[in-house]
Amino acid sequence: MAQVAEHGPVEVRRSARRSRTVSAYREGDRTIVLIPARMSLAEEQRWVAQMLERLAARESRRRLGDDALAERADRLSTAYLDGRARPGQVRWVTNQNSRWGSCTPSERSIRLSHRLQGMPEYVVDYVLLHELAHLLVPDHGPRFWSLLEAYPKTERARGYLEGVASAARLPHIPGAREAEPPDLPEYPEDEPELCG
């Protein structure tokens, strides 16, 4: 069953192997809810609503506000760019769906896509540092990349973002055997699992 919620499309996956657990996670812009095959439609609707609420609550606790993002930019600039990159404004935006971040050096402004919220901290730090480096070097030449060499997780973060972008381009194949996400602990139905 697929439905669209205020947080994007929701896909419910029923599994005969799943007997007592309910779990949910984000997959790109979709929410996947895994439930036992025997669950009634009323139980499914109740659990989907509950899991969406729990995911949203967890994500809102995780999100950095614009002020915290600006403080983080200052810390990164000090740690990796000798404090030379000083943005006038750093903020989250919801209108960047093809880029993770952007910078306007003439205005000293940095914008990060809301799609980064909830990703690992090292990934957000990398994108923020990438945009900070653009305040010093506007292009992607050798001088620019040399600025990012000091950040130890540059390659790991780039790989993560490339994986997310590649996964978003994969077609969903109806009827394909759907595997449960790996390495997820099982919780009884009264303690739903949140992952993603």
Image (cartoon, rainbow, N blue to C red):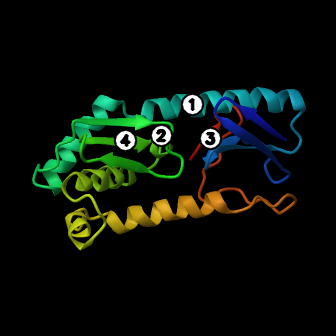
Camera-nearest label, 4 or 1: 4
Q: Position of residue 1 (x, y in %)?
A: 85, 41
User: Looking at the image, which is closer to me, 183 or 76?
Assistant: 76
Q: Mark 4: give few (<14), some (14-19) or many (20+) Cα within 10 Å.
A: many
Residue, disc 2: 114
Residue 174 placement: quadrant: bottom right
Residue furthest to the front: 106
Nearest to N terminus: mark 3 or mark 2: 2
Label placed on residue 56: 1
Tell me if label 1 and label 2 are in contact, CB under 8 Å: no
Left or right placement of residue 81 versus residue 2 in this view: left
Residue displayed at 47% across by 62% down? 160
Residue furthest to the bottom: 142
Q: Position of residue 92 (x, y in %)?
A: 40, 36
Left or right placement of residue 190 versus residue 153 in this view: right
Q: Considering the numbered disc 4 on the image, is that residue within a helix, a strand or a loop? A: strand
Residue, disc 4: 111
Residue type, label 4: Arg
Q: Considering the numbered disc 1 on the image, is that residue within a helix, a strand or a loop? A: helix
Nearest to N terminus: mark 4 or mark 3: 4
Q: Mark 1: give few (<14), some (14-19) or many (20+) Cα within 10 Å.
A: few
Residue displayed at 32% across by 47% down? 103
Residue type, label 3: Glu
Mark 4–mark 3 Cα distance, whole angstroms, equals: 32 Å
Mark 3–mark 2 Cα distance, whole angstroms, equals: 24 Å
